Amino acid sequence: MKQTLLDRAFQLLDDVRSPQDFTLILHFTKPPDAERLAAGAKSACECYHTAVRFESQNDIERFANERPLSIPIKQTCDNNILATRFHHTAADGLSAALWLGHQLSVAQGLNPPGNSIPLSLRRQEASVRRSKFAYDGACDPLWTSNPTRSGFRRWISFSFASTELQQACRRAGGFTYSDLLATCALETLREWNRQHTQNGEPRVGLWLPMNIRRHSFAGFGNGTSRIRLYARYPHCASLMEKAREVRRQVSWSTTHGEWVVPEIPLFTRVPAWIAAPLLRRYLNRPSIDMATAVFSHADRWAGNAREAFDQVERIECVGLLHARQNIAMNGATHRGRTWMTFTYDTGLLRDSDAEVLAEMYQQQVEDFLCEQ
């Protein structure tokens, strides 16, 4: 498979203290047996031209943190749990869902999705490098209990019913369910920093992945770029008003091409041992806006293999952590529930910190329902 610019960037940024891979953990009511899963994985590898390695590992936390990830995909199955680790050099979140959908379709005797379509990305002639809503300078980092990054990821997951929230968003109008969840993330970050710092009004933002495939659910690889969202609204506004402002930012950044990926940047032309430290040094400059946290939410991630996920009752996504981002907030909505996973570095945040952040997020969700 031809390496794209995004593949190359993730390869250069990969580091022991900031691993550029993610793990999808599926909890089943009744999982396929190991032999069928292996057959499905083999078929998915043939379809998407990748390689997978199976491991007998019943410690999922250890599995998600083992280094290095020298093969694009690793997988382990324990009781009712299937954990699959993807390196971002090979795949983004949607591609991971496509791969797993194919595997599960074969394992359950369903018709697997069709042949893989080559990844083709959208282009836009005119583009901006930053949002008009951006701060004058970079976002504040998330306040952390400790200063030293360990590279060891831990996560906390929680869920809430999604149907009533989705209906409330439609009644309110002017924003989507994903916009609401992003707004709750911004408010959680802002309140957390307000409680722990004395730097005035926190300047928080989200690094939001955006699907830039020409065909929304086709193409295996890195078909995701990013835009950034900011808490640029009155603190006293309602969550509905804040969510509408977030939608306004999403629309502006989408229309003006903040997501555009350069064709052939200079760092792709030099050896990795030169390019990697230069790219890290560039991104670590205080003026570069890497936002406060990563946020994503998927509610149509199953694509053409929706039936294959019928036996999945819970989804967790252990996210990657860039060197300038101290928490990843990844959500997936499935079977009437939204599962949120907060991934954090144990060298930066205590488990108790993550629990408080999760409680703060859930409080935002409850506050929105109270507004209705």
Image: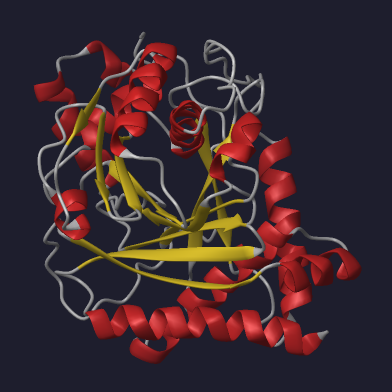
Rendered view: 52 above or below 198: above
Left or right: residue 53 versus residue 135 is left
Rendered view: 151 above or below 165: above
Give me the residue at 47% from left, 30% from top. 95
The quarter of the picture where residue 309 lies is top right
Left or right: residue 229 versus residue 192 is right
| Image quadrant where one finds the C terminus | bottom right
Give me the residue at 82% from left, 72% from top. 168
x%, y% of residue 148? 11, 67
Residue 72 shows in the view: yes
The residue closer to the viewer here, 199 or 323, is: 323
x%, y% of residue 260? 56, 29
The quarter of the picture where residue 113 lies is top right
The residue closer to the viewer here, 325 or 317, is: 317
x%, y% of residue 303? 63, 34
| Image quadrant where one finds the N terminus | top left
Number of marks in the rendered image: 0
Colouring of the image: secondary structure
Give me the residue at 30% from left, 23% from top. 8
Rendered view: 266 above or below 18: above
The quarter of the picture where residue 49 lies is top left
x%, y% of residue 305? 60, 33
Rendered view: 247 above or below 14: below
